[in-house]
Amino acid sequence: MNRSHPAVATAERTRRDPEDDPSDPFVAARAAYWKRTPHGSSRWRTASPNLLAELVQAEYRPDHGAAGRPAVASSWDLALARLRHRLRTGEVPTPSECVRLLSGDDRTRAAVFEVWPAVVRHHGRFRAVAAVRQGLRTSRNPDVLPLLLDLAEAERLRPLPPDELVPLSRGKDRRVRHAAWRLLSAHGGTPPPSAGARGEPDAYERVLRSALEGALPSAPEPLGLRTGTLVAQSMLLGHLDRPGEGLSGGLSVLLGSLGDALARTDRIAGVVTVVTACRPELEADPVLLHRRGPGHWVLRLPVDSPHQVRPEEMGRYREETAWWATRLFGALGRPVDVLHVRYADDGSLALAEAARRTGAGLVFTVTPDPHRQVAERHDVPDADPGALRHDLHRVFLADRLVERADRVVGIAGRDAEACELIRHFPQLANEEDGAAPSAPPEGIPPYRPPADGGRRSELLLRAIDRAAGTEGPPAPTVLLSVGRLHPVKQQDVLVRAWIGAGCHRDSVLVLVGGSPLAQDPVERVMRERIDRAVAGCPEARGRLVLLPALSNTDVRLLERSLAAPGSRFRTRYVCPSAKEEFGLAVLEAMEAGLLVAGPVRGGVPHYLVDGVNGLLLDTSGARALGEGLRRLLRVDDEEATSMASRAQRLVRSRYSSTAMARALAGHYLDVARERSGTAAGGRPSGPPHPQPRP
């Protein structure tokens, strides 16, 4: 197995699709914690020492642990698990404990920052200041110093007098320097000039100093807002306008079209889509607020990274991200009323903290990922300890977001009432009297053909023409698949299945996705796997077409060209993903009029009925997927046309971005109204929210 990148190794274990197991020990432990069952299951499948069992015991049932010392878990593992347990129960650690725990890893630090506001309220500012001051003066860990400054800034503490803080703001360590700048600014000070390490400040330092000096867009007029609720939505990973490259997938298309549709919805004043910008991106464009369309703006949060930040790195920038979001939300000229986050990651929790500081309501889209695969991936002898720690961290983040959120919504899946969410988030049943959260369907924007569609269509079809050859009728079938190059999308498994099942003799496989620059490490691994899959089969190599990521307009143009009645190709669309929470690319192919085959796992079966308006595939491995491909190729043209027509009518009638915008706008308006009632003396249901910072 190729483990040349952590995301690749972690994603490998998502490919199996076992039946739901009511004895899943991870599900049982969580259910027992929230008192949904009388006892948690202790039946772990492995008899050997088990890190998952030890960590789950420490996090969810520390009072029922087995005798003796843990065989696998480290002292830091157990300290973090117990800290999470204390946070779930509402117990507040002391300021000194929090300072000590900063010596742990990013996951431990995330838990500290999450509980820090409660620590200061519960134990008082005097004790918090004393603990941070002690840490600043005695810590020998260079990574901890900026974190201590961040703790102080987060709650407006004054742990050091100016004569000790100013030297830190002039230091060579940029993390310390920037944290000291932010803390000085919090108390009305002005950061001293800094030339940076090479004589001149870089793009990030220039925009940071501008922010500290108040040189940001702040007047309401440029936003062109209507009367109503101002909504922010987040996409901190990937590029909004480059779907299919690196970390950018269907969410970029969704949020772009959804933001445009929301901006046209009654009682929505406008939409701000929040993204990130690393140092090279700031060098190319230092402007932080761009207009995307009428009432829809893109707000760029600077990240002090030399490259686009990856999911596993986001925790390092948590407080920086919270600070920037707080600062920039306050510079828009009017408050953000509601913020919607969609991923259980450190970036979403950072934005949730910014919402708390600015008084915005919070909506969270919750999904049982990675919950549904925790036991499957990690209750095995060869489990990857790093992947397990990452998955448990994401579970913790999701729980904190559920607790913080004013409104939780799900993604419509196989069960229209989203009962799977209750299974993996038993606390939701406690809060909602047993009812699952609302799950508004996602949608796609109407297709608008480009002015030069004919010319662009021919350019897109040329590569397929070359692969199809000139053998004459019958022309080989085209199997089209669109998506970012990533292990969860399983393009490598698709290629192996295509060859192993012999489908390469009767079809051309067209894969669309990935950056043409091949700089992303995960994309490089996927390309290497695809190359190895075709290395021993020259016939397959000649019938495999790899196209870089296309704009959404070009993807939909290509699909329409292939689906057109007069097309010279017989085309089928295949989505080989291990799972799709909903599958916007699948919806787009259905809307274009193609016969579609998608994964049985995830949300696709909510709208695709096997044999009625498409085919469902077992994508758990190459052999099973190959059988599905053979079945797809055997569908005759008349039946394919009938199924594709049903699919097209369904998508056009029910799954539009306009309908999604209307459904979500109802939630946003409810949250804004409830929080307005809070300001008037009432309080919405759900966990308490600390007051916004001054």
Image (cartoon, rainbow, N blue to C red):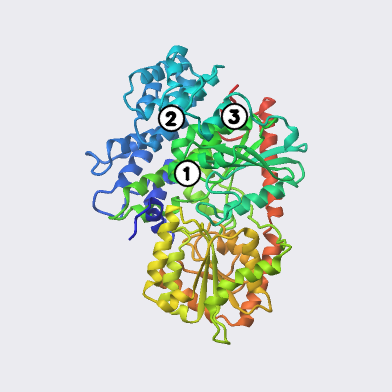
* Of marks 1 and 3, the one in the foreground: 1
Q: Quadrant of the C terminus?
A: top right
Q: Amino acid at mark 2?
A: Ala
Q: CA distance from mark 3 to mark 2?
A: 26 Å
Callout 1 secondary element:
loop
Callout 2 secondary element:
loop
Position of residue 54 measured from the top left corner of the image (x, y, whole percent) = 30, 43
Chain-order first, disc 2 or disc 1: 2
Chain-order first, disc 1 or disc 3: 1
Q: Is residue 244 left or right of residue 486?
A: right
Contact check, label 3 and label 2, Cβ < 8 Å: no
Chain-order first, disc 3 or disc 2: 2
Mark number, residue 197 = 2
**What residue sits 70% from the left and 30% below the top?**
333
Position of residue 321 measured from the top left corner of the image (x, y, whole percent) = 52, 35
Instruction: Decide: few, some or many residues near mark 1? Use Cα within 10 Å; few <14, some 14-19, many ≥20.
Output: few
The one of 262 and 519 positioned closer to us in this rendering:
519
The answer, for residue 218, to whether it is visible in the render is yes
Q: Amino acid at mark 1?
A: His
Q: Quadrant of the N terminus?
A: bottom left
The one of 68 and 600 positioned closer to us in this rendering:
600
Q: CA distance from mark 2 to mark 1?
A: 18 Å
Q: CA distance from mark 1 to mark 3?
A: 23 Å
**What residue sits 72% from the left and 45% below the top?**
263
Residue identifier under label 3 = 327
* Outermost residue toward the left in this view: 68
Q: Amino acid at mark 3?
A: Arg
The one of 411 and 241 positioned closer to us in this rendering:
241
Residue identifier under label 1 = 307
Examine the rendered structure and indicate whether residue 526 appears above or below residue 327. Answer: below
Callout 3 secondary element:
helix
